[in-house]
Amino acid sequence: MWEKLAQLKKKYLSLLEKVENQEELESLRIEILGRKGVLTSLLKGIKDLPPELKPEVGKQANQFKALITSLLSKKQEELKSKKEHSFDYTLPAFPIYKGKLHPLTRVTKEILDIFQHLGFQVFTGPEIETDHYNFQSLNFPPDHPARDVQDSFHLKGEYLLRTQTSPVQIRVMEKYPPPIRMISPGRCFRRDTPDATHLPMFHQIEGLAVDKNIRFTDLKGVLGEFVHAFFGEEVKMRFTPSYFPFTEPSAEASISCIICAGKGCRTCSFTGWLEILGAGMVHPNVLKAVNYNPERYTGFAFGMGVERITMLKFGINDIRLLYENDIRFLRQI
């Protein structure tokens, strides 16, 4: 019995070291500790030993059982850990997705690049503005109805979240004399209910040029260059009368629908045209507010929503998709 126990111990400790997977380990466990296992049979045979041998043999057999049980558990954990950290080199490779800029960032950069090539300099300003810069200097008197249309986020005192990037133009004109050619990108805020085309936070890019003898034809020429550079040479542009407090005359610029090529579709409401920005000649009152002589200097200004331009460029029908960070959507653009 002593010899048999020693042989079992030597044999199965050696076999346990060679086990390479969970299936082999389970098979070995059953062979040793199963109902008909060798150690189980040995323990059952102790009752047939002489009385003087039973205690010691039983003790040694139980110690071997405890040892092999512990080693089986340890081996199982080792195999489990090995499986979790192993790598099968025969498996197909995981797809690697190349990182890229967010659509809004890409469109903003493209727009700025175009205007910088046209001689415009980029300026930015604070998102928390005073009523003076956001409204008064832009020809919005205290009782002007356009203030209600923009429905601002007011803070303490005279401060508010800017409703447009036009205040940057005032700050630049206060600091620099003409000639000025500038463009200002940034976030703006208005009390809009989120839907497919509106959000309370959005991005604008506004441009300004002030010099002697600037005419509306200069505005049309600059915006025409932008439209052809951004949307393509085949795209047409037109102006329709509009109203903005800080420009006079004012106009809205539209392009021939890039979806239907001007034939009429749901995107352009079957008109063949898509409105992309507002523009006009700088109002004399705005020039006076920054101590520019409107008899000597004239200028034009324009502003566009980056989200709208992005939606048109990529055929997006819901502005909220740009902010949900759904990786499936972003990979399509």
Image: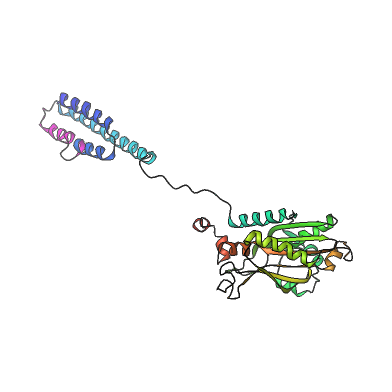
212 left or right, relative to 205: right
Q: Which residue is drawn at 57% across and 60% down?
A: 322
Q: Where is residue 261 in the image (x, y as percent from the top left)?
A: 58, 69
Kindly give the residue lying farthest to the front in the view shown: 234
303 left or right, relative to 85: right
Q: Could you say which quadrant of the image residue 307 lies in?
A: bottom right
Tell me which secondary structure the magenta stretch mostly adopts: helix
Q: Where is residue 174 in the image (x, y as percent from the top left)?
A: 84, 57
Q: Could you say which quadrant of the image residue 26 lies in?
A: top left
Indicate yes or no whether the magenta region holds residue 49.
yes
Q: Where is residue 105 in the image (x, y as percent from the top left)?
A: 62, 55
139 left or right, relative to 324: right
Quarter of the picture holding the C terminus: bottom right
Quarter of the picture holding the N terminus: top left
Of residues 241 and 76, the one drawn nearer to the viewer in this rendering: 241
- What's the colour scheme? rainbow
The answer to whether residue 150 is visible is no
Q: Which residue is drawn at 58% across and 54% down?
A: 102
Q: Residue at x 59, y 62 (%)?
A: 313
Q: Which residue is drawn at 73% across and 63% down?
A: 221
141 left or right, relative to 4: right
Kindly give the residue lying farthest to the top in the view shown: 3
Indicate yes or no whether the magenta region holds residue 142.
no
Of residues 229 and 47, the one drawn nearer to the viewer in this rendering: 229
Residues drawn in magenta = 32-50
Of residues 252 and 157, the one drawn nearer to the viewer in this rendering: 252
The answer to whether residue 173 is visible is yes
Of residues 163 and 314, the one drawn nearer to the viewer in this rendering: 314
Q: Could you say which quadrant of the image residue 3 lies in?
A: top left
